[in-house]
Image (cartoon, grey):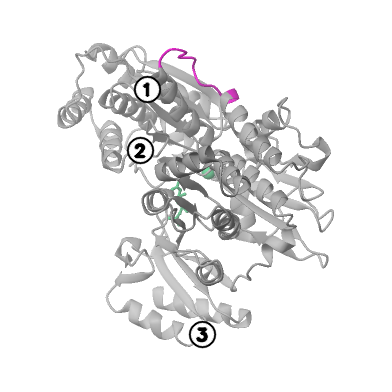
Amino acid sequence: KIDYEQLSELYDKTCRTKNVQYSYGTAGFRTLAKNLDTVMFTTGILAILRSLKLQGQYVGVMITASHNPYQDNGVKIVEPDGSMLLATWEPYAMQLANTASFASNFEEFRAELTRLIEHEKIGLDTSIVPHIVVGRDSRESSPYLLRCLTSTMVSVFHAQVLDLGCVTTPQLHYITDLSNKREREGGSAEVATEQDYYSFFIGAFNELFSTYEIEKRLSVPRLFIDAANGIGGPQLKKLLTSKDWVVPPDQIEVINDKSDVPELLNFECGADYVKTNQRLPKGLSPSSHDSLYCSFDGDADRVVFYYVDSESQFHLLDGDKISTLFAKFLSKQLELAHLENSLRIGVVQTAYANGSSTNYIENTLRCPVSCTKTGVKHLHHEAATQYDIGIYFEANGHGTIIFSEKFHQVIKSELSRARGDMLALKTLDCFSKLINQTVGDALSDMLAVLATLAIMKMAPMDWDKEYTDLPNKLVKCIVPDRSIFQTIDQERKLQNPVGLQAKIDLVIAKYPMGRSFVRASGTEDAVRIYAECQDSSQLDQFCNEIVELVK
Ligand code: 16G
Ligand code: ZN
């Protein structure tokens, strides 16, 4: 039973940001931190309802604005299995938030809440206790927003709340999933913690090295990790100082790790900065050309790698390069294990993937490729439903590999029969643990890349030279109304405005290996234009011609 008197009191006290239009986008709610009180309050309630709907299972809530500037913040809900909030619940999140934002009194909000509860047939009279896991990144505004978020959870809904404090977004996803697994196992019922996360991934990393009986050293002399001055910094350090972590400390250096200086967050550093500007982040000067570098974003769910060659030239190893590295490595293991006909491996990309990478995967690796719309949930779904080893990465560095139930069964049975290539089988088994199965995770992806490079004895240059990116450009164009730009074919073609695609196609045809597409951004009030072609000297002109058509 809901104590509406208490709820009303908390509503009046907490919902201070009024007349703000909230929208639950690809990455949850995200805007200036000072405008978030109301939406935090309603998101807390929605998470409770989601948990009640799912028999009280742990539902996760993460407070973060990822790579956005330090003044922003945001919130998103995570399903009990660690995946993103069920799409059909996104409209509820918006309705609840916007009702609270625009309502003139509590009764209006109460009516909307009641409608939702009835529509979803959520039983409130039962003995189900809602369970919630909350986490936040390092932003200064987060502790306050957490109080708005959780204000009703215990007092009104008698929920059990597991507060993880400061964690990365993927840690929150992982621990939400683990908490439910522990509950299902009953018995031990020890609450899942951050420590479980470190033990699990370090364990898989060490197991992989032991399988190869190779020394636990990186294949590069030195790795520099740019933590974007976000939560990735302290969390990385916990991993690197863990007693089980055995890579020599002089091989790894963490930079941009000042998560306690608010305004430095994502400032001229981090994955988004490096990918967009194709240059070293603040705080790094090329020390030696055999070093490897990587950058996390502010909440450590994205990672890109890079290196500097002997001519001081910067080379980006982005999400496409990470996908192709994993595809090459895992295809080879499947072949060695003679499982290439029983387990299906594939790569999932978006239209932003460089054409060269797609060509390389299809024609050199001979591996199937799918293309989906932008946004992690689309890639994740495709990877999870179409393949036994579904590798997905957005070019911006967000991604992971999903291993199917069938994969685990086949590997288990082959291992138990102890025949065939045991090394390849064990590699596949370890690798499926090393990669975070719930969501793209900078830390786990990084460990997987490092392990792959060490096993394949590859230097950054070897990794890079598998294929060469086509020259490409991504520009933003401000238009009066971006909603008129409607796409089909996984965002690769425009359906509206009518006739525009035909004009774009005529321009594309003029440029050898030309490819271009136009789509409305889901996170900014702008239209994005991507173009790539063979000849870098023609790229600006190519791109400008498309921009002129869009303007
Ligand atoms: C969001 C998405 C990211 C995507 C980006 C595109 C998630 C968790 N995040 O940040 O995957 O690349 O939006 O932004 O899905 P855009 O629509 O502005 O181009
Ligand atoms: Zn992020």
Residue 120 shown left or right of residue 135 in the figure: left
Element carrying mark 3: loop
Instruction: Say whether disc 2 or disc 1 marks the residue closer to the N-terminus.
Output: 1
Q: Can residue 56 be seen at all in this image of the molecule?
A: yes
The residue tagged 2 is: 85
Element carrying mark 2: loop
Residue at 51% of width from left, 21% of height from top?
Answer: 192
The residue tagged 3 is: 511
336 lies above or below 502: above
Q: Position of residue 491 (x, y in %)?
A: 37, 65
Residue 160 shown left or right of residue 72 in the figure: left
CA separation, marks 2 and 1? 24 Å
Residue at 67% of width from left, 31% of height from top?
Answer: 239
Q: Nearer the viewer, residue 550 or 426?
A: 426
Foreground tag (3 vs 1): 3
Instruction: Say whether disc 3 or disc 2 marks the residue closer to the N-terminus.
Output: 2
- Whether residue 71 appears in magenta in the rendering, the answer is no
Q: Nearer the viewer, residue 152 or 275?
A: 275
CA separation, marks 3 and 1? 56 Å
SS assignment for the magenta stretch, majority: loop
Q: Can residue 300 be seen at all in this image of the molecule?
A: no
Element carrying mark 1: helix
* Amino acid type indicated by mark 1: Thr
- Whether residue 192 appears in magenta in the rendering, the answer is yes
Q: Position of residue 269 (x, y in %)?
A: 66, 48
The quadrant of the image that shows the N terminus is top left
